[in-house]
Amino acid sequence: MALTEEQQAIVEQQNAIEQNRITLQAVETAKSRKMETLRMAKEILVENRRTQAAADATDITASAVTTLATDLTAFVNS
């Protein structure tokens, strides 16, 4: 049995809503993973700095954290 135009419109609208929800969920998951990678990179840098001698220790910068996070992401995705 074929759907009426109104029923077909409702089905298409529900499909569009579901696709939008899936897309938004994927974006949020990607953001969460990125934040977790940044946290991990920060923890690694903090631990590395803690184990260095005071004379060898350098400041931990935002760029150092993002660089390490990028390297970690590249490693995981390779």
Image (cartoon, helix red, strand yellow):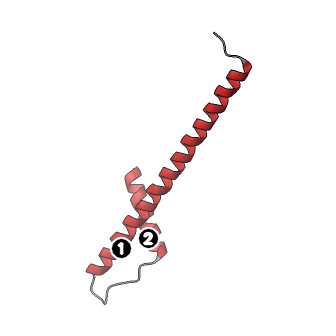
Q: Amino acid at mark 2?
A: Val
From mark 2 to mark 1, how far is it between C-alphas?
Answer: 7 Å
Q: Residue at x 39, y 71 (%)?
A: 42
Looking at the image, is mark 2 or mark 1 earlier in the sequence? 1
Whether 11 is drawn above or below 41: the answer is above
- Rendering coords of residue 64 (x, y %): 44, 73
Residue closer to the observer: 42 or 15 = 15
SS label for mark 1: helix
- Rendering coords of residue 29 (x, y %): 48, 51
Whether 30 is drawn above or below 64: the answer is above
Name the mark on residue 65: 2
Q: Amino acid at mark 1?
A: Leu
Residue 52 relative to residue 71: left or right = left
Whether 33 is drawn above or below 58: the answer is above
Q: Specify the quadrant of the image occupied by residue 4.
A: top right
Residue closer to the observer: 73 or 21 = 21
Q: Residue at x 35, y 70 (%)?
A: 43
What residue does disc 1 label? 45
Q: Residue at x 34, y 84 (%)?
A: 57
Q: Residue at x 43, y 70 (%)?
A: 65
Q: Specify the quadrant of the image occupied by residue 73.
A: bottom left
Contact (Cβ within 8 Å) of mark 2 with mark 1:
yes
